[in-house]
Image (cartoon, rainbow, N blue to C red):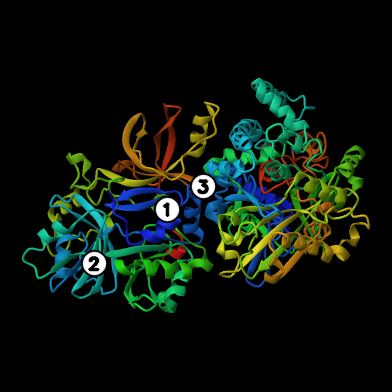
Amino acid sequence: MPAPTPFHPRSFEVCTSLSYKEWAGCYAVRRYDVYVDREYYAVRHQATAMDATPLYKYDVRGKDAAALLARVMVRGFAKFAVGRVGYVCWCDEHGKVLDDGTVTRFADDHFRVTSADPAFAWLARQARGLDVALADCSRTLAALAVQGPRSREVLRGLLGSAIDGLKFFRAMVTKLPGRTGAELVVTRTGYTGDLGYELWVANEHAVALWDALFEAGAPHGLLPMGLDALDVARVEAGFLLGGCDYTSARRALIPRQKSTPYELGFDWMVELEREPFLGQAALARAAAAGPERRFVGLEIDWEDFERIYERYGLPPHLETGTSREGVPLYRGGRQIGYATSRSWSPLLKKYMALGTVDADLAAPDNELEIDVTCEYERHRARARVRKLPFFDPQRKKA
Amino acid sequence: MKTYDAIVVGGGHNGLVCAAYLAKAGRSVLVLERRHVLGGAAVSEEIFPGFTFSVCSYVVSLLRPWIIRELELPRFGLEMIPLEASFLPLPDGDSLCRWSDPELTRKEVSRFSPKDAEALGEFALAMSKVGRFAKPVIDSPAPDPGSLHPAKLVELLRLGRHFSQAPGDELELRLKLFSMSAVDFLDEWFESPVLKAPMSVSGIIGTMLGVRSPGTAYVLLHHYMGEIDGAFRSWGFSKGGTGGVSNAIANAARHFGAEIRTQGTVKQILIEGGAARGIVLENGDELRARTVVSGCDPRRTFLGLVGKQHLPDEFAADIARYKYRGSSGKVNLALDRMPEFTCRPGNGPHLRGDIAIAPSIDYLERAYDDAKYGDFSARPYLNVVIPSTVDPSVAPPGKHVMSCFVQYAPYHIKEGPEHWPARREAFGEAVIDTLQEYVPDIRGIILHKQVLTPWDLEQEFGLSEGNIFHGELTLEQLAFLRPAAGWARYRTPVANLWLAGSGAHPGGGIMGAPGALCAREMLASGAGR
């Protein structure tokens, strides 16, 4: 049975839909209301708070903390500045992606890693012979993602003007206002592609954080947000999701299910020329050979889509939210890839998809076809490769 | 001197849509707007510091998805936020809220009538089926029944077949929709007056008719056409007010190369040899163009900017007869905090949609009675929205803007329309008195008030007789009869002069269809080249 997160006493009160799913062993709200649009629009126009506690979190401390991360991650963390946060993936010795997450440096000898899958044993295995202490704070540290164009105003209400100095992908350590004075970490990160922050606090202060945040957020229209709205926002932002858009090498049953960082569009984060790290040799070979397939954004031609429905006398129909059912992609009658996440973007008024296609077809504006099922019959609609992200507001980094 | 391919008179949303399409096709286009701000009646203005009002039109209804797509409006700043609910506070302390979630709505309605709660689903399905018939009608130029052109005849035949080949029950529904009053039509489906009253009002908005007047039922369809678009629905608030739509269209038009000038008052359309050759500005400057497009209403265009002497007598008579009879006004309020409704206290999702003051059919009919005899309603129908609940960009944190659409406010008051300014204050008070019955502390939280009478809508926004739709959307003024028989396809009896505003098919609302269809006809005919 899933466990409640430390925010549960508060989130349960407002989750009128009782719509939950399991996330890393925890209860996670899918949508607070039956009607999901409210949460989606709030993250794009107002501000939302989402319980992100189920993420796995590990503290890495000690003289060799940087050395461990340099050894494990595809990015070099040896010279990573204190106060920075980095998005990164890590690979097995064959250069196949295991997971992706963030790394925050709090001090020369203190980092924190977040991941979608458990990574403690794996990190511990790589730490042999190094002077590091690993601590699993996955279930002792609560996390709340505050996202949306008004998120800065909300946090200014909570923390004062200190928040104004926090730049994109930077961290600050402060105190939760009030009697407890508990340590509160704020990172300017998120999974929505919007202006946003993530707040990290020990479990016992989670409810106090929730209460203070919603009080500060009331004049700015702060709403709690669940995973369904997040799933649309992250597709707009072009963020892939492990287990949906790619399979971790740890979970793959056959080789073709595994991916290199190059296939996932993580080229920019792989730093080959440095101290040895896991998968380095394999990645060097993969980089030289070039990927066979690539992760891309797709825009499905709406007129085509509408026409398919018209043949049945039906108006076009899409479920709200993101569909994670994989569908084939074609070109010239041959299957050349698959789409793994599909959403209607209420903001961009586009039917978007994330998928993987043969590398030679991955250039923007290439025309492909996507499988569309209507009345249990299969059709094809045109789809064009699009540059990611679909949505990239200036405020995200401003 | 430069000769433009087209000069568009009026920077309302339809004029801008038309300009954008023409520019996209490579035509040189100049848009001239009289006011300092673009948008016409789809306009946002900071009337009180920090508070942005959707001054006139306040929700985006049926903005055509294909226009959004073809002009890439999201890329140029269009952001829409759907209305979540329709809230009906009642004077006895009860209330009804209709939600986007049908189950929740069913629960609310069943408190008043379990039968109606079930009928709602059937009604929505039936209306959606009929709405599907109406959709192609608003997305293409009106067929011309008088035309002998083979292509036009085929078009008409197709539409006729589309109409008559419907299953019997759908055909019956269509005929009833086009002939009955909103109330009679709803009576066939529902028993609870609490449900019927707010539903019936969509039939009267912008017309000088009552909910019991025949011919008001079909407008109910509009609501279900919005629903067809489902996830792509086009009912909603526009971020930054309805001016956000106009600005996005203007940005698109500029991107495609159109030139847009505000404070460019057109005095007249230049007619030489029976054809439009350009315009004359108020300061006397002449600007030449191969075509002139008017986004203004038919009266302003033909009897004002063109002049009767340039029109065939019959057409001039038709235009003079065309009915405006503005029947509504607008009260915009800047509020110090969220208004508290007695029947549902607190801030909640019920305030994130539209709020109707329409407690009963008799109330609405009585409101109409006042108007029939030349007065504004002592207790008017109000359609209230508080867009700041979902769009914080329009008010300072914690403060709100409240927009009240008010009907009836007949242009032709018994003292004569020019006496409206003297009655403006009393009109505003009637609206606030009405609100006070549901929000007792309303007077205490008003920071600023803007009252627009139909006279103001005419004088300031150029809407003849204050009609928000450029002429009533009654059946005899629709489709191939809008604005006059034989002239429904955006052409006019004056060569090179085109009509792109809401006075052309398919009519008013922030649809954009008249502007886009006008441009399409112009381009198809090679106009301006």
The numbered dot on residue A233 is: 1
- Label 3 chain ID: A
* Kind of residue at badge 1: Ala
The residue to which callout 3 is attached is A349
- Label 1 chain ID: A
The residue to which callout 2 is attached is A112
Q: Nearer the viewer, mark 2 or mark 3?
A: 2
**Mark positioned earlier in the residue sequence (3 or 1):** 1
**Mark positioned earlier in the residue sequence (2 or 3):** 2
Q: Residues within 10 Å of mark 2 (few under 14, many from 20)?
A: many
Picture quarter with the C terminus of chain B: top right
Query: Which of the pair A163/B212 is nearer the observer?
Result: B212
Which percent across, then down, holds residue A98? 20, 51
**Mark positioned earlier in the residue sequence (2 or 1):** 2
How far is the residue under mark 2 from the one under mark 1? Answer: 25 Å
Which percent across, then down, holds residue B37? 69, 63
Q: Nearer the viewer, mark 3 or mark 1?
A: 1
Q: Is residue B161 left or right of residue A323?
A: right
Q: Are marks 3 and 1 in contact (CB under 8 Å)?
A: no
In what element is the residue under mark 2? strand
Query: Which of the pair A121/A331 is nearer the observer?
Result: A121
Query: Which of the pair B115/B311 is nearer the observer?
Result: B115
How far is the residue under mark 3 from the one under mark 1? Answer: 13 Å
In what element is the residue under mark 1? helix
- Label 2 chain ID: A
Q: Is residue B318 left or right of residue A297?
A: right
* Kind of residue at badge 2: Arg
A174 over B504 or under it: above or below: below
Q: Residues within 10 Å of mark 3 (few under 14, many from 20)?
A: many
